Amino acid sequence: MAQRRFPTRTSLLTAALLAPLAATSAAQSAPPHTTPVAATATTTDHPAPWTDRVQIQSGPAGALKRMHAPDVALRIVTPDDSEALTPKGLALLFSGNEPDYFQRNNLPGSIIEGQASPAITLMPNVAKALVGGYFRYAPDALPAQTSTLRFSADTWALVHQGNTRKDPLYRLNHSSTIQQRRADGSLAEIISCNDSDDRATLGAWQADDYARLKGAAQMITMKCIEKLVKRIPAMYPRPLAAEDVSAYADGAAPPARVRVYAALGRTTTLYTDAACREDYRDRIDVKYNNAGDKGLLGIPSTEALRSKENQRFSTLSYQEYEVPGGKPLIFEARFDASSRVYCDGKLSGQFVAGPGQDYEVEFEVADKICRLHIRQVHADGSMTPQQSRATPTICEGTRAPVRIEPRQEMQVLLFTPGKLQIQDATQNSAQQQLSDDASANAALQQVLQQASSTPGTRLCIVTPGSTYSSPLRDALWNRVLESPQALPSLWLEAAAVTPSHSAAAGAQVDLATAMTHCKAIPIKEFAAY
């Protein structure tokens, strides 16, 4: 029994929202924008109210260290481009059994300005109809604060395949993202769209003014927008129905109880009184090594519990918690980074815990499928699936205040030219100093591995400035991007640290100053993107 979602007529809504695609696709041949441009609705005397709250933009993806800029227009890589890669040309490129496709895919090639990436023109136009249709369907979901949906073009290229120059096939490579950003610019949600399967000769791609390419762009847009359709209710949620507590004395509802099962290498997180992941009362991370070490609350035994008790060669691990009744709960489950396993998509759900009711939560993996089971437990031990909805990615902050306190499990990393200093935020911990060059990369990776193996550890990283680059700084940046959940971090510039302390203007920040500053930063600032 998997968790149930609140009924939303998803299939009918999806069909209605995607209906404008055919009409909108005709506009995809418009010239591409090379800078982010807001895709706003057509100006009228009475503009749609949602356009004041949700801005739709498009533009190139963020700059990366590679051989070409993000593809806002079609890039074609031919054998001639590959031949220029090295003096030895194609012979070196195909010296092994497998061609070096990565290098070839990233060659600059030739740019066809008239064929824009679908992330630049087609997707934003379809998204306008999608978002407008959603808010007509759910007007109570219109957010009070502004946000942005940004379509970022990364790859849009035809790249030759094989090791022959005679009429080779060309593969269409596409990648782009849809980013939902809050009013302050911070990232709330990201949707990745990647397609690299369609192949044909270059002549076939270019025939009839790139007709095949335009058809592929429409299909890619459809697949990407379908992902957005599924996430829109979480990006812009309707108000969660509150529990009526008027029947209780002074409106004080009795607590609810929840049993959370644990398993090795997995973490189930419970947020109480939670409007969203940033607005909650308490956060509890239930792991295999911390479940079952406290007193249980007497939630009735269920078939799931008895089944686990009867399993041979396994140690039963679970914990029971008391949570506020009549308040929303959020559960989310994931594999620990050290397990090197992950689930496709987020396992998360939100619902209002009934006063005096019992629940149990289980993160299960069966037949290579991840499931988050949320069940209501009745007095006789029987169970029914608990209806839940997708956890909001952003919220208005009208419910419980976030509990802000200094983070204890944290490492401070201070970069100064030629040197990296590291220290745990706990008292009397030893400092570690590394020479900021490639020879110290192995030592840095060991430090980061130890940090990620301790649940809850944050990294507070101070650099001389936003443009600072060094071997260890770049290695740290790449590692954080690879493991955002295991190593949530906050990057600060030294200039932002110094003014809050007594040091003279322009003085170099020392580790003690950085430590004091970092320990005072609220936990919610350490976002795991």
Image (tube, grey):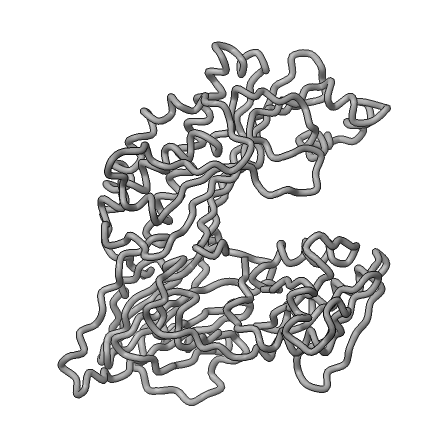
Q: 4 or 463, which is in the foreground?
A: 463
Q: Position of residue 515 (x, y in %)?
A: 68, 76
388 to the left or right of 100: left
Q: Quadrant of residue 79 in the image?
A: top right
Residue at the far left in the pictured view: 247
- Against 406, residue 278 (above or below) is above
Q: Position of residue 268 (x, y in %)?
A: 46, 69
Instruction: Work out whether residue 367 can be spotted.
Output: no
Q: Quadrant of the N terminus?
A: bottom left
Q: 133 or 503, which is in the foreground?
A: 503
119 to the left or right of 451: left
Which residue is rendered at x = 54% and y = 29% of the image?
A: 197
Q: Quadrant of residue 241 in the image?
A: bottom left
505 to the left or right of 221: right
Residue at the far front in the pictured view: 505
Q: 501 or 153, which is in the foreground?
A: 501
- Against 458, residue 84 (above or below) is above
Which residue is rendered at x = 27% and y = 41% of the image?
A: 48
- Against 43, residue 78 (above or below) is above
Q: Quadrant of the C terminus?
A: bottom right
Instruction: Work out whether residue 447 can be spotted.
Output: yes
Q: Position of residue 270 (x, y in %)?
A: 41, 72
Number of residue marks = 0
Q: Quadrant of residue 112 in the image?
A: top right
Which residue is rendered at x = 74% and y = 71% of the image?
A: 509
- Against 176, residue 348 (above or below) is below
Q: Position of residue 153 (x, y in %)?
A: 53, 36
